[in-house]
Amino acid sequence: MARKDTTSAVVLLGIIALLASSAAAFNITRILGELSDFSTFNNLLMQKKLADEINRRQTITVLAVDNGAAGGISSLPSDVQRKVLSVHVVLDYYDTKKLNAMKNHSTRLTTLFQSSGQATNHMGFLNCTKHSDGTMVFGSAEPGAPVTSQLVKLIASRPYNISVLQVSSAIVPPSIGTTNANNSKADAPLPALTKAKTPISAPAPSASKGKKGASSPKQDVRAPGPSNNDASADTPSDTPGPLADGPTADGPSTNGPTADGPTEADAPADDKSDAADAPKGSAGNRAVAGVGLGIVALLVITFSF
């Protein structure tokens, strides 16, 4: 009975150990730490916090470069280094056997950089091409990027969780260093276009309006004229003595234009409305004077007979 219990306990511990090993499927830092030729690449993964992200994945392929080729990454700016390292992490399992079994001569692989949301212009993908001589090369899928990083060998694999492949050179998309700059330019608001407004000047006073405004006092001055003329015209009818004298009776008719003269002289030459009114007033005065002369003439003829 005790032996049976011991066997059950061993089996249980084995199951627990198996579950624990499944939970921690791999550790990229430990794998590369056993290979001194890849110490620079391993340190870069740890510095940029990518080692932990790789270890959290269930299925992954890492394209590693040795210390001699790692300078193509370490010489880049710090923020670009993480992006380039992410391009070397493929989100699927590929070992040499699976690559050689590819039916197409070229295929596209999705990288960790594509999942970051910062990839543009196909920079988050890799082109994998198999040449006729059996060699395999990798390169960025960005248009115009070279596909020249050759597969060297398989470093480590744990089907179908992780595969570590050595490539001959670092894979750097040509435009990866300008990704942030392009995004910032696209997000920046456009400057508001302002158009200066030309101030509208006040309209100059019209000459005709000014003349009309000035003519009103002249009309007031000219208004009493007819009343004076009418008074002079009525005077001969009330006093028959002076009216009998012909020359005296002609006086109002000859003096009539003189009375109207100052009014016409003061009127502006180009003011048609005022000039048109002046003759009407003088004509009325002359008509009254004419009627008075006719009456005087009749009286003279009557008294002569």
Image (cartoon, grey):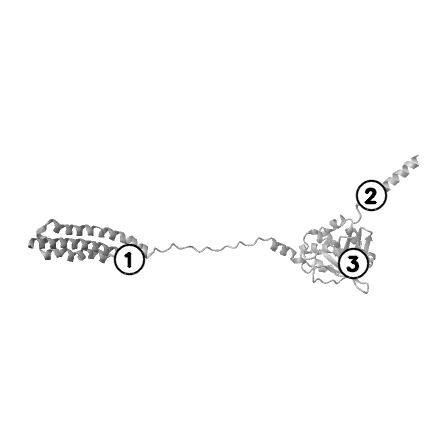
Camera-nearest residue between 234 and 46: 234
Q: Position of residue 87 (x, y in %)?
A: 72, 56
Residue 273 visible? The answer is yes
- Residue assigned mark 1: 272
Q: Earlier in the sequence, mark 1 or mark 2?
A: 2
Residue 244 visible? The answer is no
Numbered disc 1: secondary structure: helix
- Residue assigned mark 3: 166
Camera-nearest residue between 95 and 73: 95
Query: Is disc 3 surrounded by few (<14), some (14 to 19) or many (20+) residues within 10 Å?
Result: some
Quadrant containing the C terminus is: bottom left
Measured in 3D between alpha carbons, the distance from the residue under mark 3 to the one under mark 1, in whole angstroms, is 107 Å
- Residue assigned mark 2: 19
Q: Relative to residue 276, is residue 134 drawn left or right? A: right
Q: Relative to residue 96, is residue 282 drawn left or right? A: left
- Corner quadrant of residue 269: bottom left
Q: Relative to residue 227, is residue 165 drawn left or right? A: right
Quadrant containing the N terminus is: top right
Q: Identify the amino acid type marked 3.
A: Gln
Q: Earlier in the sequence, mark 3 or mark 1?
A: 3
Measured in 3D between alpha carbons, the distance from the residue under mark 1 to the one under mark 2, in whole angstroms, is 116 Å
Numbered disc 3: secondary structure: strand
Q: Position of residue 200 (x, y in %)?
A: 41, 55
Farthest residue to the front: give it.
305
